[in-house]
Amino acid sequence: MPRPRDSAPDLKTLQAAFGRSVRSATVNGTDVQLLAGSGDATLFSAGIDVYSNNAWQFFLTALERTYPVTQRRVGTDFFRQLARDYRVQRPSQHGDLHWIGEAFPAWLAARMAGTGYEWLADLARLEWACETSVAAAQHDPVGPESLAGIDPHLLPHVALAWQPSLQLVASPFPIWSVWQANQHEDAAAPVDLAAGAEHCAVVCIADRVAVYRLEAADHRLLQYLCAGMSLGAAADAAVANAGTLGRVLERLLAWAFGEGLVVQVVKASPA
Amino acid sequence: MIVTGGPSPAPVQGLIPARAGIGLRSQHHEAILVTAAPPAWLEVHTENYFHAGGPAVRALERARARYPLSLHGVGLGLGSADPIDRGHLGLVRDAVRRYEPGLVSEHACWGHVDGEHFNDLLPLPYTEEAVEHLAARVREVQDFLGRQILIENLSAYVSFASSQLSEGEFLAAVVARSGCGLLLDVNNAYVNASNLGLDLDTFFAALPRYAIQEIHLAGHARRRVGTRELLIDDHGSAVCDDVWAWYEDALRRFGPVPTLIEWDNEVPPLATLLAEAARAEQRLERHHAAAA
C-alpha cells in the first residue's frame, strides 16, 4: 500500500482532476502526479481509458436509444459526431441516463440553424416527446357517455383532463411523415421535406406509443383544451371560421374519446 | 481516526431469502412471470423504475407481486464531493415506497463533479476524509429513506496515491460510522485483485461479518487497454471458476446470504441466468445444511 504524499489532494480536488482526465480521455502530467503519485503511470492511464470509454459509451447509447430516427436520418457516423459535440456543450446533468437526451432537440436546433437541416431538430423534439410519453402515468379513460348527462347549455363550460402521456408537437416540416417512414427496418420511403407543416399528438396507451398526425385546427384546439380551457373557450380561440367550429370540435372529441385520451370530464359553472 | 466494530442497526425486515436471485432485465419481463423454475428473488436497477408509468413500471409491478424484490441504485454517486442530488434521492424514495423492496443498495463510489455526471461508478481514494464523507452521505440517505441501505464494493481500474487504508478497512470504517450494511460483489473484488493487486484473503478478513447482507456474482471480460491487460467488470458473461471459488470462500466466512446473478450486457435467455442462479443455490444449500 503506497503511503500518501504530504500534499495529498482533498476529495474535491481529486475528483475534479479525475473528471478532467475522464472527460478528455487523457491524463496530463500534473494530474497523474496528483492522482497516482509515484505509482505506475501507465497502469493509471490505462484505467482512465476504461472510465473515459465507459462514460462516452453510456452517453452515446442513451442518446441512440432516444433518437433512433434522427440517427437513421443522419447516419451513424454523423450522429456520433453530433453526440460528441453535444456532450462537450451539454454534459450529463443527471445520475439517471434517461435524461441525457433532454436538451438535445434545442441544442440541435442551434447547431442546424441556417444549414437547411432545421427539420432535424423538430424530428428530435418528436422523438423526445415519445420518450417522455412512454414513461408517463396512465389513467383509466372515460368515454363520450360522460358528457351525456350534462345540460347542453353547460357543455361549452366543460373542461377535460387528459392522459399524462399526451404530448403535442408542431413543425413547419413534415416530421410525422419522416418519423412514420422510419418505423421499419427496411429502407425508408423518401419524404418530400418541402411538403409543409405537420402537427402531431403523441400518446402512450396500453404500453404502446402512438404518433398521430392532426389537422392544424385540431392541433390548435387540442393545445387549448390541454391547457385547461373549456370546450367553448378553446373552440372560440382555436377555430377562426365559426361555420366549421362545431365540426372541428366534434371530430376532435370523437377521436380523443375513441383513443382513450380523456380521463376526466370537469364540469364548470358558466361565468 | 478510524473506528471499527459495533453492530449495524437491524435491517428492514425484508423478504429477501438467503437464496439465489437474478437481476431482472427488460428482456425477461414477460418470461419471469411464467418460468417453471423461478428464482428465489429479483433485483432491479432503481433508476430504471423512476417513471410514473410505462411498460417497464407495469412489468415490475407484476413481478413484484410474485417475487421478493431488491432495489439496487447506480446513480446517486454517494461519495461525490459535490452535494447529493436531492431530486434523484427523492425519486429513490418514491421507488422504495412504491415497490417496498426487501433490500436497498448503492455503491461505494462517486459519479459527478462540477455539475457533470459521468454516469459511471467512479472509485474513491481510501482516505480518512473519504470515509467520513461517504459515511455522512450514507447516514443522510438512510435518514431520508427511513431505513438501512447496503453499500457495494466497487470494481476499479485505478488506485490513488493518497489512499491510507486498504479497501476492506475503508468499507469496514464506513459501515461502523454509518450503520449501513454491505453488499459484497465477489466479482468486483476478483477484478480488483487482478487489476490492482488486491489481496482477496486480506480483503475478506477486513470486512465485518455481521454487515454482509447480500452477495453479487457476475462475469467479466479480459481486454488489452494500451499496453496493459485489464479485467473489465462488464457483466456480460457467465461467472468464472475462480469467482465461484471465492464465492465458496465468502460463504464459509460470512454464512449463507442472499446471492444475486448479475448479467447486464449480451443478456442471455432467462434459462441461462436461472442455470447460473442454480449453481449459486447449490452452494447456498450446502452452507445452509452445514449451519443447521
Image (cartoon, grey):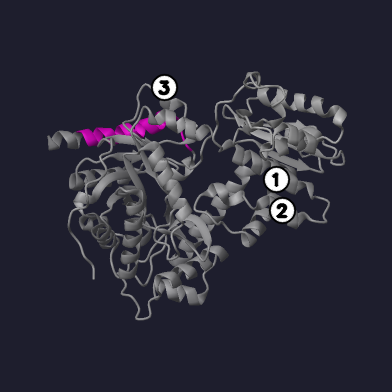
Instruction: Return the residue at label 1.
Output: A124
User: Badges 3 and 1: C-beta atoms under 8 Å apart?
Assistant: no
Residue B88 drawn above or below residue B272: below
Q: Nearer the viewer, residue A37 or B167?
A: B167
| Residue B12 percent location from the top left of the image | 27, 43
Q: Residues within 10 Å of mark 2 (few under 14, many from 20)?
A: many
Q: Residue under mark 2: which chain is it in? A: A
Closer mark to the observer between disc 3 and disc 2: 2
**Dot 1: chain letter:** A
What's drawn in magenta, residue-wise? B267-285
Prevailing secondary structure class for the magenta stretch in the rendered image: helix
Residue type of the residue flagged with mark 1: Ala
A222 or A12, which lies in front? A222
* Image x and y of residue B110, in percent: 42, 60
User: Is B291 situated left or right of B275 in this image?
Assistant: left
Quick check: marks 2 and 1 in contact, CB under 8 Å? Answer: yes
The lab-note entry on whether marks 2 and 1 share a chain reads yes
Give the spatial CA distance, label 3 vs label 1.
38 Å
The structure residue drawn at horizontal position 24% and vertical position 54%, both measured from the top left corner, is B204
Q: Is residue A189 visible?
A: no
Element class at badge 1? helix
Say which amino acid is labelled 2. Leu
